Image (cartoon, coloured by chain):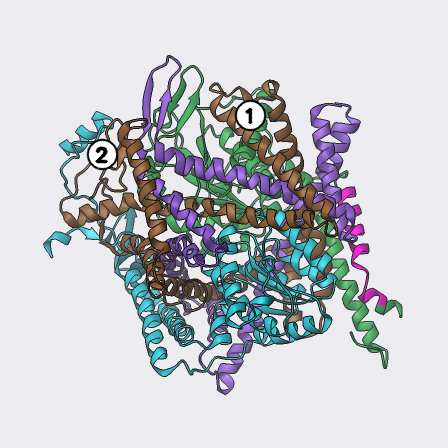
Chain colours: A cyan, B purple, C green, D brown
């Protein structure tokens, strides 16, 4: 393929692109497979999710509202996932006519949530129980949002709180405020740095990607279950990478150094080593080359016609043209 | 009283107002909470216009002409007129309140999510590729001694090898906790899973411990603001 | 209720009051505290000291007043360090529109502080450039990596005696064509914006990070994977850097003691002009008091639990 | 085609990039707006069964640019501002390189347009409270009044600085006018300080949470507490310093170099490097895959619930 000559997958080398595409394949393939079989697959128990019904039940008994907060992240997979979980919570709450409060920190997330929650009520045939004010936008600003939601928690005396999404520092404000009025909490943040605070202050915590597994767990929809299986395959792939990596690395590091890797000025080369006998360092290994591809001198210098439209400093252009 | 003293006094009152919720939710807190939410809403409006819509949209759409001190106008950037189509697309978001056409609000939402999703392919390997590589640590020592004061490049000392092995074990056992669709059977696998949870807890404890500093730093700074800047500087300092 | 049971269930408001009183009291006691700087902070000091003369430093300043307690100390240290080395710098924010203003105020204060000490006064356009705010960190950092001139196209700066000029004509950026030409990029942040910078730029420029204690744990994997060349984490990082500035690394003081030791590493000088021990030193002592209080609370709670369990028939909570 | 979304450095222009103030630009802006409005009304007549495809189509196209940008072969170290691409493949790669920025910014601009939706919701809730004279309606009034005042003075201040202050006199306080003072008092004096106050409140909560949670009840709670305590002790510089002095003394008297590993900083550093980092990494590996999978499902319109139902 002559026209591709000198063209490279820039930063990553082939290995990165290959791995990414492999993971994409795992996910899509399993989704397709699950669609055929109906998604009847095993998913391990996730304690935090089993607690959802208890929490709703408690709120119903006490006649107090349920609070849901999808974090303060922009509209992305995390917020959408949080809203998806809240749709499941709302489904149950709607049946018991338990009031809900969904507080958003982003107008975009608010739009999605409003749409989804209204759908839930109308699908359940309970549009009369839906109030447009169940979903509220509080504030775009992190701590104004925290102050506003704390106020709602304390004034409305919520009985159950679902704090699921991208939470940052405000996580503990919500969690401790809920705790101070004895609300039952199910929490989970995709920010691993906030998980310990939820563990310290909340009743049930979803750790890491239990959050992403939640909607598959709750709905058993083939697409989600298939995707979850695909993710598990990808996890096994990553584990295999780590295992093979450390095994090969261990073996390679025992070998004497014969060819050395030299990185200089943005280009690298492999050069025979003829000094005093010593072992390979990490950067001389094959594993290293796989993850940090060699960008050689010739890849880096390709002659092209100068751009006639370029109007930068003339010296630079001349120097480039003359080289 | 100088302007600075007035400003600092306002700030200190606001701080006490919010702090009062630590005692109980009172009307005093409610008063400051609602001021706070109001200011935040007003500020968000201003900031969204001046930092996003004006600079990223309005100026890009209409171009910019700089006028120098002696009155010579030069074009700093051209107008990118196609951006004006974004206004009607943004407007579609407002259809969320319409009973009939609420589906249209999903178009701008879909575009935002599409842009986010498209970036994930690149982000994934760029983030995790190097982390996988740096987890591929050697575990077979080349010499059976502890790390000396002057380590030799290329040698792997026994203690370092052991540490590496612990690192990999922690990673893999904790990662095994996140396998959802496989039933872990047998002593080894369930044991690995339990260990994984413990390792996670140790990690969480460490995060908690290191975060404590950040939180205390903030309260220390706030107290310094009240006592040093307001009381000592503005009130007693007599400025 | 026995005393042990009471110890297990102290009203939270009493704890809050004790904390407020202790922290306030701590601020009025100033003592210099000896310490062992974290290797990651020490590496950051070394990386900054290793920037070649005449290179320009890119500062991404992504903090606001809400994390003043840590980030302001970081930013002040960074400015003092760069100014003492006479390095030129540009700063901007990619995380928060308010951030440039906070950075500007702090910078003005440090410039004035140096002026009062009779040191060289940094000039806008000549020694530093203020690029303001860029919306969308993701796109900004991506573009900076692909084409710096395009990413910062159209930006202008004031310069004494020359009015407004293009940033590329100023001495600060005239030798910088692409990001690889910068001496270092330092991200002072209170958010995950460091992740984006690392993902997009770590292969192109040496990155240093000055982060809050919360963000710290997420940056350490990058540090360990050598994607980041040094990290100062939280208040300890502020003090660590001040300590390195005051004592150098592997540098013997008058008594022949090495205060900051880096086994097998080079010797780095200390900073001789301007302030070295500043905000970090003042807050660090108070932190000790707060931490002791926290540990005490945990210990008392556990003692209470253990003692009330010993009593036969005691209720468990 | 390749000029689309690309930059034309002034004074140069092209079809997509017109000089400011020219008829061409104004025609373009108005034309694009009209096309947008036509699209708006056109879409509102679309029958139900096609709606899903339209949403999925928009989502897919928006993401496609980034996927191509990643997968398209791009030459290393090419500077297409100064050099011409050698062939169509390079040309397209070069175009992707410049097109990515305007597309990425679209997300911000659209999100900014949608902000009004949130403000509308907030105002609706509080205006209703005032109208119904609901309990605490006075506070709702306070909220609305303070937001309006903040917005007015915020815009006023911005307007003065942006358009009526060519020499940037307003950067120093001596030249401030009434509006600048009010804006500063509200924003810097109140809003920012309330931000900091709210944030710092977490320190109090951390104390009560640690007091309650860190009890020796189970293995999990105990290991979590132990590692937290070690890290907290390590934050105390005075303690680590004394500890390492003691350890160094021991090393000298016994001659056992291994003891240096029990230095508090070393232990805490080891715990972080070999427990905290891999534990976080394991979580992040999972979360990253979750995000990638969710991204794929959203991009390809496979998510049943939520956005593309």
Q: Is residue A64 visible?
A: yes
Specify the subunit that label 1 lies on: C
Looking at the rendering, the stretch of residues picked out in magenta corresponds to C6-25
Residue located farthest toward the top when viewing the structure as drawn: B70
Nearest the eye: D44 or C26: D44
Q: Which mark is residue C111?
A: 1
Magenta stretch contains residue C56: no
Could you tell me residue D292's position as x and y percent?
A: 39, 63
User: What residue lies at 79% left-to-right and 72% top-to-bottom?
Assistant: C306
Nearest the eye: D168 or C141: D168
Indicate left or right for C200 with D237 as reference.
left
Could you tell me residue C241's position as x and y percent?
A: 56, 41
Nearest the eye: D43 or B15: D43
- For the C terminus of chain A, give its image quadrant: top left
Q: Judge depth for marks 2 and 1 and give the one in front.
A: 2
Q: Secondary structure at mark 1?
A: helix
Specify the subunit that label 2 lies on: D
Could you tell me residue D69's position as x and y percent?
A: 28, 52
Nearest the eye: D242 or D135: D135
User: What residue lies at 60% left-to-right and 51% top-to-bottom?
Assistant: A138
Indicate left or right for C95 with B22 as reference.
left
Could you tell me residue A191's position as x and y percent?
A: 53, 59
């Amino acid at each position: 393929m002559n026209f591709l000559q000198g063209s490279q997958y820039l930063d990553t080398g082939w290995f990165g692109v290959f791995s990414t595409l492999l993971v994409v394949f795992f996910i899509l393939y399993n989704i397709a497979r699950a669609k055929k079989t109906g998604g009847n697959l095993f998913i391990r128990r996730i304690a935090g999710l089993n607690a959802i019904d208890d929490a709703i039940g408690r709120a119903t008994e006490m006649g107090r509202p349920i609070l849901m907060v999808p974090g303060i992240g922009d509209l992305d997979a995390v917020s959408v996932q949080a809203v998806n979980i809240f749709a499941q919570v709302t489904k149950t709450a709607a049946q018991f006519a338990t009031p809900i409060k969904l507080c958003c920190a982003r107008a975009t997330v608010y739009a999605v949530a409003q749409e989804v929650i209204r759908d839930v009520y109308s699908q359940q045939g309970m549009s009369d129980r839906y109030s447009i004010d169940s979903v509220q936008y509080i504030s775009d600003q992190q701590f104004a949002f925290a102050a506003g939601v704390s106020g709602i928690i304390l004034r409305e005396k919520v009985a159950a709180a679902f704090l699921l999404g991208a939470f940052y520092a405000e996580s503990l404000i919500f969690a401790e405020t809920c705790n101070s009025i004895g609300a039952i909490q199910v929490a989970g943040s995709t920010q691993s740095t906030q998980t310990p605070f939820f563990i310290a202050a909340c009743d049930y915590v979803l750790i890491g990607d239990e959050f992403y597994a939640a909607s598959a767990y709750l709905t058993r929809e083939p697409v989600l279950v298939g995707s979850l299986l695909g993710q598990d395959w990808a996890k096994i792939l990553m584990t295999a990478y780590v295992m093979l990596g450390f095994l090969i690395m261990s073996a390679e590091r025992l070998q004497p150094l014969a060819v050395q890797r030299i990185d200089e000025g943005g280009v690298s080369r492999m050069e025979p080593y003829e000094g005093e006998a010593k072992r390979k360092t990490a950067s001389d290994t094959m594993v290293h080359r796989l993850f940090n591809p060699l960008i050689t001198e010739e890849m880096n210098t390709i002659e092209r016609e100068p751009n006639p439209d370029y109007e930068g400093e003339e010296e630079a252009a001349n120097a480039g043209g003359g080289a | 009283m100088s302007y600075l003293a007035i400003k600092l006094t306002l700030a200190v009152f606001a701080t006490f107002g919010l702090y009062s919720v630590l005692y109980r939710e009172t009307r005093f807190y409610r008063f400051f909470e609602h001021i706070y939410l109001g200011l935040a809403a007003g500020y968000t409006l201003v900031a969204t216009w001046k930092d996003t819509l004006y600079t990223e949209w309005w100026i890009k759409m209409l171009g910019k002409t700089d006028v120098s001190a002696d009155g010579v106008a030069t074009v700093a950037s051209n107008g990118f007129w196609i951006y004006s189509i974004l206004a009607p697309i943004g407007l579609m978001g407002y259809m969320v309140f319409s009973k009939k056409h609420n589906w249209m609000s999903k178009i701008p939402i879909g575009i935002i999510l599409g842009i986010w999703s498209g970036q994930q392919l690149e982000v994934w390997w760029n983030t995790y590729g190097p982390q996988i590589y740096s987890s591929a640590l050697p575990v077979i020592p080349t010499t059976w001694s502890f790390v000396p004061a002057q380590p030799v490049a290329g040698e792997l000392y026994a203690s370092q090898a052991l540490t590496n092995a612990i690192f990999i074990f922690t990673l893999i056992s904790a990662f095994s906790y996140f396998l959802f669709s496989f039933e872990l059977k047998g002593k080894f696998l369930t044991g690995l899973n339990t260990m994984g949870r413990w390792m996670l807890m140790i990690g969480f404890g460490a995060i908690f411990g290191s975060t404590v500093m950040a939180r205390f730093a903030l309260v220390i700074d706030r107290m310094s603001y009240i006592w040093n800047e307001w009381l000592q500087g503005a009130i007693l300092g007599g400025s | 209720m026995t005393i042990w049971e009471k110890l297990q269930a102290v009203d939270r408001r009493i704890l809050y009051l004790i904390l407020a009183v202790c922290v306030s009291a701590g601020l009025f006691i100033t003592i210099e505290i000896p310490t062992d700087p974290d290797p990651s902070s020490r590496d950051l000091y070394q990386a900054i000291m290793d920037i070649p003369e005449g290179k320009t430093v890119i500062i991404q300043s992504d903090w606001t007043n809400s994390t003043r307690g840590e980030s302001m100390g970081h930013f002040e240290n960074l400015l003092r360090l760069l100014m003492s080395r006479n390095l030129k710098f540009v700063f901007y924010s990619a995380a928060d529109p308010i951030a440039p203003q906070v950075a500007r105020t702090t910078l003005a204060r440090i410039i004035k502080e140096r002026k009062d000490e009779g040191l060289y006064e940094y000039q806008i356009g000549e020694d530093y450039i203020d690029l303001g705010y860029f919306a969308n960190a993701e796109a900004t950092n991506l573009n900076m990596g692909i084409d710096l001139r395009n990413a910062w196209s159209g930006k202008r700066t004031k310069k004494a005696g020359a009015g407004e000029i293009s940033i590329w004509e100023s001495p600060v950026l005239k030798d910088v064509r692409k990001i690889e030409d910068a001496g270092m990029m330092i991200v002072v942040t209170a958010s995950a914006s460091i992740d984006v910078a690392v993902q997009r730029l770590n292969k192109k420029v040496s990155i240093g990070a000055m982060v809050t204690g919360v963000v710290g744990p997420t940056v350490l994997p990058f540090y360990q994977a050598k994607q980041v060349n040094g990290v100062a984490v939280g208040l300890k990082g502020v003090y660590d850097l001040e300590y390195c500035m005051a004592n150098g690394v592997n540098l013997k003081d008058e008594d022949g003691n090495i205060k900051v030791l880096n086994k097998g590493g080079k010797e780095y000088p200390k900073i001789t002009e301007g302030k070295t021990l500043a905000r970090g030193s003042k807050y660090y002592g108070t932190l000790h008091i707060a931490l002791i209080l926290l540990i005490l609370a945990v210990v008392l709670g556990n003692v209470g639990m253990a003692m009330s369990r010993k009593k036969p028939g005691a209720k468990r909570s | 085609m390749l000029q689309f979304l690309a930059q034309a450095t002034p004074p140069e222009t092209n079809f997509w990039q017109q000089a400011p103030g020219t008829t061409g630009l104004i025609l373009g802006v108005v034309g694009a707006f009209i096309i947008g409005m036509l699209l708006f009304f056109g879409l509102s007549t679309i029958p139900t069964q096609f709606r899903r495809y339209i949403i999925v189509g928009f989502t897919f196209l928006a993401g496609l640019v980034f996927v191509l940008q990643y997968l398209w072969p791009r030459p290393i170290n090419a500077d297409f501002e100064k050099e011409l691409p050698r062939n169509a493949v390079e040309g397209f790669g070069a175009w992707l390189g410049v097109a990515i920025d305007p597309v990425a910014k679209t997300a911000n601009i659209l999100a900014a347009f949608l902000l009004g939706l949130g403000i509308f919701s907030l105002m609706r809730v509080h205006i209703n409270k005032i109208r119904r004279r609901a309990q605490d309606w006075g506070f709702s009034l306070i909220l609305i009044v303070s937001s309006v005042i903040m917005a007015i003075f915020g815009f006023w201040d911005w307007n003065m600085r942006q358009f009526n202050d060519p020499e940037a006199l307003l950067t120093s306080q001596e030249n401030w006018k009434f509006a600048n003072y009010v804006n500063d008092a509200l924003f810097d004096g109140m809003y920012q300080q309330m931000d900091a106050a709210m944030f710092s409140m977490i320190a109090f909560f951390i104390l009560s949470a640690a007091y309650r949670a860190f009890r020796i009840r189970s293995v999990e709670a105990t290991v979590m507490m132990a590692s937290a305590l070690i890290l907290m002790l390590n934050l105390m510089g005075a303690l680590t310093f004394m500890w390492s002095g003691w350890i160094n003394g021991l090393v000298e008297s016994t001659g056992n170099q291994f003891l240096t590993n029990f230095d508090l900083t070393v232990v805490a550093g080891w715990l972080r490097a070999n427990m905290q980092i891999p534990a976080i990494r394991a979580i992040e590996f999972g979360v990253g895959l979750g995000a990638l999978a969710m991204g794929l499902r959203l991009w390809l319109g496979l998510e049943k619930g939520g956005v593309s139902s």
